[in-house]
Image (cartoon, rainbow, N blue to C red):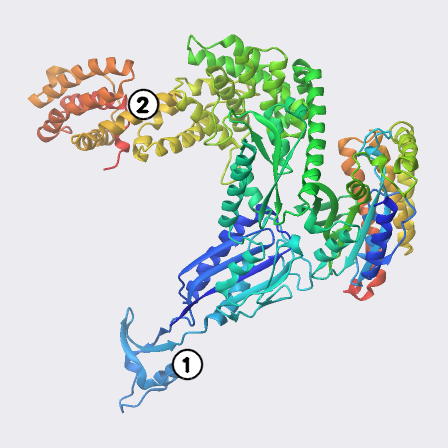
Amino acid sequence: MTKRDALLEIRIENIPARFITSAETQLETRARELLAEAFLPFGGLKAYGTYKRLVLHITGLPARSEERTRKAMGPPAKLWKDAGGNFTPQSAGFAKAQGTTPDKLTVETAPKGEVLVALKKIPGRPAAKILAGIFPEIMAGLDFPKTMVWEETRVRFARPVRGLLALYGEKIVPFAFAGVKSGRLTAGLSAKGSRRIAVASAEKYFRALENANVLVRDEDRARMLEKELEQVSKRMKLEVEADPELLTENLYLVEYPVCVVGSYSQEFLKLPAELVHLVMKKQLKFFAVCDSRKKLQPYFVGIRDGVSRGQKNVEEGFKNVLEARFKDAIFFYTRDLAVGLDELAAGLKAVTFQEKLGSMQDKTERVSDIAALLCESIKVPELNTGEIKKAARYVYADLTSNVVREFTELQGVMGYYYAQNAKLSETAAKAVGEFYRPLNAKSPLPSSPESSVLSLAGKVDNLVSDFLLGLIPSGSADPHGLRRQAMGIARIILENNISLDLKAVCRNAPATVPLNSEPLLQLLDFIWQRAEVIFEEAGFRFDEIKAVKEFFMKDGNLLDCRRRIADLHSVRKNPDFDALAMAFKRAKNILKQAEFASDSAPAELLFEKDEERLLCSDIRALSVKLNGYLADRDYAKSLVELVSIKGNLDNFFVKVMVMVEDAAVRENRLKLIKSLVNLFEDVADLSQLQQ
Amino acid sequence: MNFQDIILRFDAYWGKQGCAIVQPYDLEKGAGTFNPATFFGSLTAKPMKVAYVEPTRRPADGRFGENPNRLAKYYQYQVVIKPPSGDIQRIYLNSLKAIGIRHEEHDIRWIEDDWESPTLGASGVGWEVWLDGMEVTQFTYFQQMASFELNPISAEITYGLERLAMFSQKKKNVYDLMWNDRVTYGEMHKLQERQFSHYNFEYADVAGLRRNFEDYEREIAVLIKDGHYLPAYDLVMKCSHSFNLMDARGAVSVSERVALMHRIRDLAKACASAHVRASEPVNSIQ
């Protein structure tokens, strides 16, 4: 049977770029589900999108869906025929209801006993017919961030649907949606007058549109855009910065990317480079241009749709708009510089942070105090606490600046320039500038220890404040981005190897009321959950991570925990380790069942067997060694030592009965086990490990 | 193309499309949408095609005639079509051709921009249209007016005439625009901008405006009760302008702002309800 392609093209009035990729995924998922439900097999399936059309391309569809046999269970088998050998009314009725005759029924064993079974052949249906049902269903099910009505059926869609092309091979797949009937017509590039094009077959769709200057496939436009930008770079002997976000955005603003290169006045390069980039990127979606040393050059590259006539008009228009925006930026920036850093910071008094948490000035003071706590806990002599203190006063100052009010994305970044302008040291200015880092799970961290401390302080204050108010993220609701903040804390600590007691810092953080045990533990648990992600990405197993969690809840030292996990992970490869972990679990269970919790040492006089004595002397020797290792936080050596006890421990469990009648002996043995368990528990909770 | 020629060409073009070329409504308003032709016209099922120039007042946007782009009073050209045909976008693009702007020679972009007027209780879905990067039109499919879900839907096209003229004449300062071959926009409007900026920011009598607002509000209630919703709506526009002036004077606190906007919205809604009742008696009984 020959197989053909099917194609659905929904032509829409300019759909917002941000709607498109999700719509593509939905088209693919829904199509897959519905084709499976219709028993219509296919070779491949892919969705594409531009600002004018959403397209679903299905390849290798047979002309008909598969023939199937449906089985229906009926009355008990004994009711098939009566004593006279005639079909009973029950079996005849059942057969009729199933569209067959009673002689064609068969018998099968069901849970209830033997029953009559009717097999019904369901013939395949023509693919075009099936698609005519599936296509409108897919369309009706699409979810968009916002929808509208525009015609009398009052169907909701992202933007008005103005055309439907639906083909199976050469055949039109007939259906209607929102008052539009499907057909074989599509439209070419808007800039060329949206010329009507009749498409002969689904297989010829992409080529037909390519000839009309429309690259339907996202990847074709991406390739073309990248190639164009490369050529511009080559021609200018400069580098067009191919910002990946901008590439993606531009992909959904045009159907056929054409570059428009222009220049702007050198004077705008006085602006901070980040500001220049943002002005170009945010609204105009222009690419910036730099030289081989990454220094910005006064050129822009804009993307227009499909035609290169009137390039001069477009270039001039783009340039005027860009320069007008730059002029605004210069106006704001020079005003901010004239106002000065102290004055900007003074304005924070009038800015409310959150209703119950005072002004941004109050917040500034809290962050400053937390930074001091952190310095105390970190205790690294090289840390320049004086500069941290100085910088802390200004971390939020730029929030009152004109530039940040206009471009909120530049919070922190602008603070650096204002701090520099106020003659703060480079260390302090950078600490202000990097205060919000890292912005996400992969983006750069603060670059110096001083920046790291200040950034940690800001995040701790956000978390402590919200946990106190009970604003703990649940499900997908996390309006203050607390998960990101906690992730930032974990990354700064782990990637910079900072040893500190987060628990003490959070407990002592200035707040309306001290953070007491319950929210404090919730907060530590919340931070631990982010750290777990990092640990798992590093290749540690979840049970190893779990075995160490209690140390974090107790001491708040994330770095120490990672060391424990890493050491546990490597020593675990020792062939004796699993058995040791089992023995430990057994020891712990015995203590639990006996409800034994005393920490006093066993008495040698009460030992009856050599195995007890051997184990005891092992434990004593181990205890001395472990104390040394643990002081150095050398958990690997500690674990290796613990493994060495395995022989004598096994013998003990084989030869010695713990829960004996004699209370004194029993108690003494429990003490022995407890001392062993204590040793282990200083390293990790091995009972969490799974085989 | 001269400023007045753009208007003449639009009138001719949209007139040919079947639009009634309505004249500006003789009251201050913050947007062309306030024009009764649009406000009442969009509410009912009766088809509508109108186009008009609408002088628009935004007291707080005044800059004493000093800023090349900001004006306290400017001109919108507005087209409202109900129901819009399937090729309304093409019809719009052809209107640009009518003033000499050919799509294939320019970059024309439709940027997502959903419109909302809290004082009219109105909202719509649509775009800003950018011409070589400059915003020249707001294109909106109304979804709600005076808190009514609309059926059928109207398309509203609002051109910024000054922007289009600056684009067409390649001028960077609005006051340098040629109104016709002899007179500039500046000669006609600069003095007005300067004096009105003083009035809007310094002289407007806040207590008087507040009083007026309340007087209008009382009058509206009486008028609506007796079925005279058209004059009532005139007074709603006056309330809205009084509010804008008080706002420009910095006399409206954040919380009062919300409260006043709600009051205007409720007044507008009362006028709209009266109109809907009057034009569709059957519906109002149901």
Chain of the residue on which disc 1 is drawn: A
Name the one closer to the observer, B61 or A190: A190
- Position of residue B86 in the picture relative to residue B261 (left or right): left
Nearer to the camera, A165 or A160: A165
Relative to residue B202, is residue A6 depicted above or below? below
Q: Dot 2: within a 10 Å radius of its alpha carbon, few (fewer than 14), some, or many (20 or more) residues?
A: some
In the rendered image, is residue A148 in sight?
A: no
* Front in this rendered view, residue B106 or B235: B106
Tags 2 and 1 on a common chain: yes
Residue A569 lies, in percent from the top left, at 27, 29
In the depicted structure, whether residue B143 falls above or below residue A433: below
Question: Which quadrant holds the C terminus of chain A?
Answer: top left
- Against B134, is A508 above or below? above
Q: Chain of mark 2?
A: A
Which residue is the site of mark 1? A97
Where residue B19 sits, quadrant-wise, is bottom right
Going 54% across and 17% down the picture, which residue do you hit?
Answer: A430
Return the x and y of residue A584 as percentages of the image width and height: 21, 29
Choose between A389 and A437: the one closer to the eye: A437
Question: Which residue is rendered at x = 15% and y = 21% of the image?
Answer: A664
Residue under numbered circle 2: A563
Relative to B108, say whether A245 is above or below: above
Q: Secondary structure at mark 1?
A: helix
- Using residue B142 as the reference point, say whether residue A207 is left or right of it: left
Closer mark to the observer between disc 2 and disc 1 = 2
Q: Amino acid at mark 2?
A: Arg
